[in-house]
Amino acid sequence: MEFLKKNPKIFQWLFLLIVFFALCFAIEVPETYKFIRGQAEFIKDPNQSTFVFAGKEVRYYAFDVFWRLPPLLGWLPIWINDSLFFLMNDWMPMEFWNEDTQEFKTRPLLLQISRNLTGFMTFIIELIREILLGGLETIVAFTSWDFIDANPWAELPGLPWTIVAAGATILSYKLSGKGLAIFAGLTMVYISVFGQWKPSMQTLSFILVAAPLSFIFGLGLGISAFKSKRVEKALYPILLVMQTMPQYAVLVPALVLFGVGDHAAVIITMIVAIPPMILLTLLGLRAIPPEVIEAGRMSGCNNWQLMFKVLIPTARRDILIGVNQVIMVCFSMAVISAFIGAKGLGFNLLLALNQLNIGLALEAGLCISLIAILLDKMSLAWANKQTDYFGNLSFFERNKNTIFFIGAFIIGIVLAYIGTFLFKDTFNYLFEIPHNKGISTADFWNKGVDWIFDTFFVYIKAFNTWLIQDVLQPMRALYLRMPAIATIVLVVGAGYLIGGIRSALVVCGLTLFIALSPWWDRALVTTYMATFGVIVSCLIGFTVGTLCFQSKSAAKFMLGVCDIFQTFPSFVYLIPVMMLFGITDTSVLIAVIVYATIPATRYTIEGLRSVPVGLHEAATMSGVNKFQRLTKIEFPLAFPHMMLGLNQTIVFALFMVIIGAFIGTEDLGQYILKALSDKNGAGIGLTLGICVAFIGLIFDNLIRTWVDKRKRHLGIA
Amino acid sequence: MSEAVIKCESVYKIFGENAEKMLQEANGNVDAKTFQENGCIVGVNNASFEVTKGEMLVVMGLSGSGKSTLLRCISRLTDATGGKIFIEGQDLLELNNKELIDLRRNKMGMVFQSFALLPHKTVVENIAFPLQIKGINTDDSISKAMDMVKLVGLDGRENYFPRELSGGQQQRVGIARSLAVEPDIWFLDEPFSALDPLIRKEMQDEFLRLQDKLQKTIMFITHDFDEALKLADRIAIMKDGIIEQLDTPAKIVLNPATEYVRKFTEEVPREKVLLIEDVMDQSASDNLGDLRVSKNEIIENVAEKILTQEKTVGVIDGNNKIIGSINPTKIINTVFGGRKNGN
């Protein structure tokens, strides 16, 4: 009792928990309740009754008062769908000039905009693709199909792979030096020799369009948000939701707006990649000391010079992290957007996963990861490059990279030409090694998987059964056993205790949205999987991070590992776990754990590192041992930063859980996947996405509020 | 007296939403308290002064006294709420954006307390920056910047990044950058405050050497009264946005205008600040000894000589003409009298 009086906060938390459990026990599981909710809107169940709410029919069960809330928002997906279709097909019809038929045609404005946009995107993707691979589309775009028929020579020949490989190597050398050059060369040779050239170049052309466009738009919007409070206020909620929105969910509405194909994939990738770029640009610009801005002004900069010569370079560090994020998201989307018809490695990867050909999937995944790492390193090197004013170099020295490239270009063409004689009857391996004609290790890996399965089947199965029966099922049952009203009380109470009335209202709104949607049960399943993943990830991440922190080189090594792992597209994580655990919930959870451990580890190390040196010395002089220093000094001070890591861990885990639907889970992700193949899926997909985003935002709000308070308390804000 | 390069006529800077309206209503009678009650903060309150060509005006005040705000009004980094500012006869507040940029590119240089160097540029690139902004090509701007590097004694370090330099070296870069466009007017906002005392003294001497050579018109901001005394031709002492006193160091030390100024002057070793001229009797006495001292000597340097004399000492000007006299008692009074415990 004394203890409680001294810590009123603990008393409040205890009280909240007591109320929560009281509600849980007071509300019985209704007899008619079955885990089928989610289809409530679409399948008529004789147990349901209906009433009309605000002009919409709401179907609900008798227990839909405290146990679950009535799906009052059931109309939302349908409304979104209808609005989208209305906008696309009936809104603002206008006369547009049609090139093909040479006449004016009436078309809805948005449809026309969307068609023009996609046409433009298609053109630049095809242009880059045909430089790399050869083709007709670009020439067609400038002339016509008739022209091609009349002139059979009119075809972009495409570059032999040797030239592209040499080009990448030379460019890497110019940007960063030998190390990166060797890596680039090996990557390119690997891709080519293993017969992944064509899909890789398709993916690359997609990235080379999506990443720069996302960067430019993100930077531009970030700048305008920095300059105008109004723009920032308008952007902020969108940015917040987009950060926690699973990438899957955005695919469906994009399908309606932009159709199927690479162009839609580019646009959707931009939608996902721009928000983090905006946020980081804004963050970087905000952190610039006012005196630097004044120094720029006093140097006589006009607004343009001030922005591009002073502000942006000064904020370079954060903007670079933004570029890094953009590249990561682009590769991640390169795989996911295969669902809406993007060609390339992602498509092969999905296909291989679908056929359970783990070997092929592994090869494609490896290629995509290698290119991701390469581009990431190259962009970093480019941004860090310095000019040398004092070099008194000869013409050769100055232009050696260009000269080498021209040399490589000529040699490549000659080689490709010789190749036409060497490989008269087969494929010209010196021009392009066709898909599946290169060396393939797929069989090896598949045999390996089989061997693992044959040898360890008993153990894996036993582990699987134990995990599912003794851990996952009970946990899932517990989550589903929570009455909706109890969950809301718990979440809102936590919000109030952490952040006061404001925070409570925000989380209350977010929770109510999910509770009033028809997918509360599914959301609970998503949350349970994410919770399990987050708990295990944090345990691993915090432990590994703390251990690595003990030695400087280990910490540096671990951060490097995190960097590389983070560059892997999220889908790639599914490959090895499917190898080991097949198609089960265990696979998904292990992928979640691996993926979400990255931020947990990173933030632990960074948090511990940020503890001021002075405190270390003070602690040492007070005579603490290593363990005491860790528990008394480092952990308390690093804790806020580690909690931000927890925040990231939750977002990562949620993403992976949703992607795990590809393997088969019974959560929100499953419905998002379903919505992809549904003609009317846009509304459902978007609403589901918002639900997932809101789960993330509830935790985000609670954690951030707590961290801000704690940091202010510790004086390290 | 030569023409005024900088001229301020009752400049006001008031922060807050209704600043302009309130200033008009106040009718030249701005009271910080009433403004604060209405949500406005008075930064600069009715500042009027002139700085002539080649003169160094030091604005001294504690933090929050409005000295930096005043400087930013004159460089138009913020717009003054009221009053007029003339730069070489041009009305600063009337300039449009393009003219203002032109003025800054050619006439003004500024040094900042936190150095404000661009972290992504090397020393020489930082110095060449204002030149490149002006549109001068790379080769010319770099070679001009190299001259500046030599001027501030950083040769050999031109390819370093700011983060690789010590504070003093960074400020040398800041000084070189502000001088690169050869401005007529030089603003320095507490340039040496972030440096440790030894480096600060070294930089002050360096600064005096530069000014001796360049003869710029200078506004120098500091919170250090000793620094002000050491550098200034004239000192403006600010408190709560108001210029309490504006005069030469000697006159401020001898006749502090307000109680506030007096507090600063109390601890000042007068013999190090005052010249013979400042304390001599204007009338040449008949009863002079043999010793003659120049009117421009600092008291400290000649005090010993004078004190060993029994007779009054004659004071001469540059043409060896006797213009006044000084007796040992006067020296003793100046050095020991008028201090806190002396009163």
Image (tube, coloured by chain):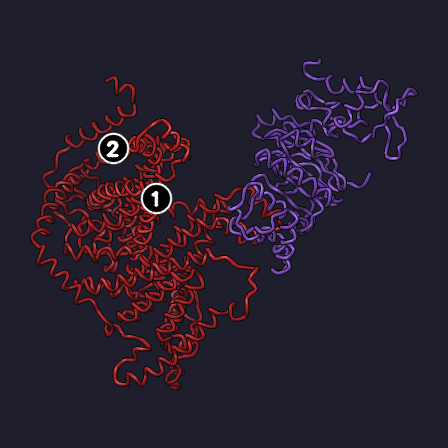
Chain colours: A red, B purple
Q: Quadrant of the N terminus of chain A?
A: top left
CA distance separating discs 2 and 1: 45 Å
Return the residue found at the far right.
B286
Q: Which kind of residue does numbered mark 1 sit on?
A: Lys
Q: Where is residue A532 in the image (x, y as percent from the top left)?
A: 20, 43
Q: Position of residue B6 (x, y in %)?
A: 73, 40
Q: Nearer the viewer, residue A586 or B182?
A: B182
**Above or below A454: residue B209:** above
Task: Report whether A256 appears left or right of B258.
Answer: left
The residue carrying pointer 2 sits among few (fewer than 14), some (14 to 19) or many (20 or more) residues within 10 Å by Cα, namely some
Do circles 2 and 1 both sit on a common chain?
Answer: yes
Identify the residue under disc 1. Answer: A552
Q: Residue at x 44, y 45 (%)?
A: A283
Identify the residue under disc 2. Answer: A489
Q: Position of residue B10 (x, y in %)?
A: 71, 34
Q: Position of residue B299 (x, y in %)?
A: 76, 26
Q: Which kind of residue does numbered mark 2 sit on?
A: Val
**Dot 1: what SS?**
helix
**Above or below A468: residue A570:** below
Which quadrant of the view contains residue A329?
bottom left
Q: Which of A564 and A56 is in front in this view?
A: A564
Which quadrant of the view contains residue A676?
bottom left
Task: Report whether B222 appears left or right of B184.
Answer: left
Could you tell me if the residues under marks 2 and 1 are in contact, i.e. CB atoms within 8 Å? Answer: no
Task: Report whether B18 appears left or right of B309.
Answer: left
The residue carrying pointer 1 sits among few (fewer than 14), some (14 to 19) or many (20 or more) residues within 10 Å by Cα, namely few
- Of badges 2 and 1, nearer the viewer stands 1
**Dot 2: what SS?**
helix
Q: Which of A712 and B165 is in front in this view?
A: B165
Which quadrant of the view contains residue A209?
bottom left
Instruction: Answer with mark 2 or mark 1, whichever residue precedes in sequence.
Output: 2
Number of the label disc, if any, that sits on residue B28: none
